[in-house]
Image: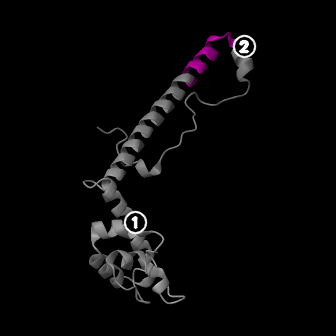
């Protein structure tokens, strides 16, 4: 067994060094982000970006930004492994289609609410004047007074798309 020939207390190499079959130095740039317990994480990043490019990117960044950069690379690499053609763009496109569908459903539901309120107001006004006035009491709300939520982010965008 190779493990028994290692020095006592010597740390195991990180997933990157293990995959690259090299000795893991104490100042290894990959070690904090690619632990030995998760070898697939680095394998995907290596497959998509290459170890040399990842090393260069991490070296050029300040230490406090490296974790976020690794998270982004891992996300993109995993997306590329799942969908080699579109990667993250495929996931974003799928989510955008879901948003469009949900906005359409919301608009239809809001239109139905308006329709139902109009029918309700029409049926109330068709009752005898005394009954309607007793029921309405001192309410002076206009017919089209509704609580509606408007998404401020989408005000400049078309709601319907092809």
Q: Nearer the viewer, mark 2 or mark 1?
A: 1
Q: Residue at left 73%, top 20%?
A: 135
For marks 2 and 1, give the CA distance.
73 Å
SS state under label 1: helix
Number of numbered discs overlaid on the protein picture = 2
Residue at which label 1 appears: 40
Q: Is residue 2 magenta?
A: no
Q: Give x and y (percent) for residue 104.
A: 42, 35
SS state under label 2: helix
Q: Taking 20 as reference, is 121 left or right? A: right
Q: Give x and y (percent) for residue 134.
A: 75, 18
Work out which quarter of the rendered image holds the C terminus and state it: top left
Please tell me the numbered disc located at residue 91: none
In the image, 17 versus 69, the foreground residue is 17
In the image, 119 versus 140, the foreground residue is 119
Residues drawn in magenta: 117-131
Q: Taking 129 as reference, is 39 left or right? A: left
Q: Residue at left 37%, top 40%?
A: 159
In the image, 104 versus 9, the foreground residue is 9
Please tell me whether the stretch drawn in magenta is mainly helix, strand or loop.
helix
Instruction: Decide: few, some or many residues near mark 1? Use Cα within 10 Å; few <14, some 14-19, many ≥20.
Output: some
Q: Give x and y (percent) for residue 108.
A: 46, 30
Query: Which numbered disc flags the more N-terminal residue, 2 or 1?
Result: 1
Residue at which label 2 appears: 131
In this view of the protein, can residue 88 be seen by the observer? Answer: no
Rendering quarter of residue 79: bottom left
Q: Residue at left 32%, top 77%?
A: 20
Q: Residue at left 47%, top 47%?
A: 151
Instruction: Work out which residue is located at the far left of the displayed protein and give it.
Output: 85
**Position of 107 relative to 118 (above/below):** below
């Amino acid at each position: 067994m190779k493990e028994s020939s290692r020095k006592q207390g010597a740390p195991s190499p990180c997933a990157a060094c293990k995959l690259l079959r090299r000795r893991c130095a104490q100042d290894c740039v990959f070690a904090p982000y690619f632990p030995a317990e998760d070898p697939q994480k680095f394998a995907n990043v290596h497959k998509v970006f290459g170890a040399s490019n990842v090393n260069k990117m991490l070296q050029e960044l300040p230490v406090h930004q490296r974790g976020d950069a690794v998270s982004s690379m891992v996300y993109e690499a995993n997306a590329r492994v799942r969908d080699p053609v579109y990667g993250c763009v495929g996931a974003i496109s799928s989510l955008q289609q879901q948003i469009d569908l949900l906005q359409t459903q919301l608009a239809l539901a809001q239109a139905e609410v308006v329709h139902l309120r109009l029918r309700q107001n029409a049926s109330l006004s068709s009752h005898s004047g005394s009954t309607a006035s007793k029921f309405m009491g001192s309410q002076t709300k206009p017919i089209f007074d509704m609580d509606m939520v408007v998404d401020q982010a989408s005000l400049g965008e078309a709601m319907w798309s092809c």
